[in-house]
Amino acid sequence: MEKAGENQAIINAIGEPIKKGPWYNASLAVTQKRQSVSCTFPVSGPLGDGVFRLKAVRNGDIWFSSFRPQNWEILIMDALLHLPANEGKQQTMRINISGNVSPSACTSCTAQPQDKQ
């Protein structure tokens, strides 16, 4: 949330202040062996609303996880924003929040307005 609040593209799209939505609209998923995690949570601003997403995988052996810190690699950290109707068409915009996502992990992380279907 902190990184998203500092992202100028997100601020320009949905305005300030950016507020978290209700917890019951959020999601959290962890794989059985706790090797990956994904979560989404709703956000809103005065100009629009959307969803922040995070997907990460854990590097290292899970058997000794209590004895040493684990490294998490963030695969996706982005915002899917729903913008108000412009010329009769609602738009959805995807904005990359993480500056260190490798191109192989996420190929379409740039801000791209798209028609909502």
Image (cartoon, helix red, strand yellow):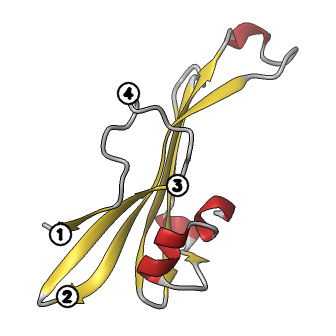
User: Residue at the spot x=67%, y=12% of the render?
Assistant: 60
- Quarter of the image for the C terminus: give it: bottom left
Check disc 1 and report its element: helix, strand or loop: loop
Alpha-carbon span between mark 1 and mark 4: 26 Å
Q: Amino acid at mark 4?
A: Ser
For this rendering, which residue is in front, 83 or 7? 7
Location of mark 1 (residue)? 116
Q: Amino acid at mark 3?
A: Ile
Locate residue 87 relative to residue 30 in the image: left or right: left
Alpha-carbon span between mark 3 and mark 1: 21 Å
Residue 86, percent from left and from top: 19, 88
Check disc 3 and report its element: helix, strand or loop: loop
Location of mark 3 (residue)? 97
Q: Amino acid at mark 1?
A: Lys
Location of mark 2 (residue)? 86
Alpha-carbon span between mark 4 and mark 2: 33 Å
In terms of sequence position, does the residue under pointer 4 or pointer 2 come before the other? 2
Location of mark 4 (residue)? 104
Residue 69, percent from left and from top: 82, 22
In the rendered image, is residue 29 in sight? no
Asked if the residue under mark 2 is in contact with the one under mark 4, i.e. CB atoms within 8 Å, the reply is no
User: Residue at the spot x=64%, y=63% of the render?
Assistant: 1
Alpha-carbon span between mark 1 and mark 2: 12 Å
